């Protein structure tokens, strides 16, 4: 079992580190794509604190792919349980955040410090909410970084639209409505308003090809500082 977990973690970390993603409808891939789409949208909305350059956006999105890596240590009987979890089971399930952070922290091949930093924080805190009602640390307000909040929305949105052993999948409009209503915890109002105004991030041509394309990074880095700061309707900024 341990060897199996180690090889699965290795495979996921290698994918994130080498940027070798291939299309998949699985949850980690979807969270990566939605994260990138949202990082792009909030940047184009020019929301203060929510502006990211393409290299950063790709790094955060790749780290977001690893958000649930700790579930490799969660008992399968718990992951596949039909019906609601007991309080004890819920507590056990919530441990995937700390398990994920630990797997990333101790991963021997995870030498890129920035990717490691993002992946560690995302694994540990992707279930935190700004009202302090999330877990495992009950972080509040600005204790949650803007990019962490974006990954949390991407995770919630993606999860709602997927079937789970204890509930059916939710349609896209209903999923977004639930997020806006606060049914899945509280998110930053400015962030929700921007994403609600510009729903392109949902389907907005955010393909693996776009996120993987080095041209995106080069196009941005070849711009002057003034060009980088100037508002534009297109990505890269
Ligand atoms: Fe999770």
Image (cartoon, rainbow, N blue to C red):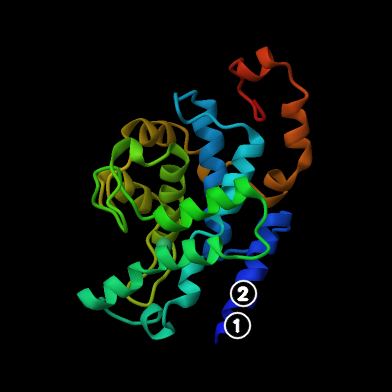
Please indicate whether residue 2 sits to the left or right of residue 147 in the image: right
Does residue 60 appear left or right of residue 133 in this picture? right
Looking at the rendering, which quadrant does residue 30 occupy? bottom right
Q: Tell me the quadrant of the picture where the N terminus can be found.
A: bottom right
From the image, tell me which residue sits under label 2.
8
**46 relative to 21 in the view: left or right:** left
Query: What is the distance, in whole Å, between disc 1 and disc 2 at their CAs?
Result: 6 Å
**Is the Cβ of the residue at disc 1 closer than 8 Å to that at disc 2?**
yes
- Pick whichever, 223 or 210, lies toward us: 223
Residue located at (21% from left, 74% from top): 87
Q: Which residue has dot 1 on it?
A: 4
Q: Residue 98 appears in which quarter of the rendering?
A: bottom left
Secondary structure under tag 2 reads: helix
Q: Is residue 68 visible?
A: no
Q: Is residue 18 above or below residue 8?
A: above
* Residue positioned most to the left: 87
Callout 1 secondary element: helix
Residue 50 drawn at (x, y percent) = 47, 31
Quadrant where the C terminus sits is top right
The residue drawn where x is 42% and y is 70% is 163
| Quadrant of the displayed image that contains ligand 1 | bottom left
- The structure residue drawn at horizontal position 34% and vertical position 35%, both measured from the top left corner, is 142
Image point (65%, 59%), residue name: 110
Q: Residue 111, image x and y in percent?
A: 67, 55
**Could you say where residue 152 lies in the image, as x and y percent from the top left?**
41, 50
Q: Is mark 1 within 8 Å of ligand 1?
A: no
* Mark 2 C-beta closer than 8 Å to ligand 1: no
- Farthest residue toward the top? 226
């Amino acid at each position: 079992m341990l060897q199996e977990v180690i090889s699965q973690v290795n495979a996921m970390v290698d994918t994130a580190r080498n940027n070798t993603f291939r299309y998949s409808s699985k949850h980690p891939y979807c969270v990566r794509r939605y994260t990138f789409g949202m990082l792009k949208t909030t940047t184009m909305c020019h929301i203060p604190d929510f502006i990211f350059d393409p290299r950063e956006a790709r790094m955060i999105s790749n780290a977001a792919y690893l958000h649930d890596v700790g579930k490799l240590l969660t008992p399968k009987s718990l992951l596949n349980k039909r019906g609601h979890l007991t309080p004890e089971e819920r507590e056990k399930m919530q441990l995937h955040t700390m398990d994920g952070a630990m797997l990333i922290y101790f991963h021997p091949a995870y030498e890129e410090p920035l990717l490691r930093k993002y992946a560690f924080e995302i694994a540990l805190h992707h279930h935190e909410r700004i009202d302090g009602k999330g877990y495992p640390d009950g972080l509040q307000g600005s204790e949650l970084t803007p990019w962490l909040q974006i990954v949390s929305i991407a995770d919630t949105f993606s999860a709602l639209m997927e079937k789970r052993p204890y509930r059916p999948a939710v349609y896209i409009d209903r999923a977004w409505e639930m997020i806006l209503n606060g049914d899945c915890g509280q998110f930053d109002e400015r962030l929700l308003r921007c994403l609600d105004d510009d729903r392109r991030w949902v389907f907005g041509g955010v393909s693996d090809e776009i996120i993987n394309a080095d041209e995106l990074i080069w196009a941005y880095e070849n711009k002057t500082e003034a060009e980088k700061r100037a508002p534009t309707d297109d990505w890269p900024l």
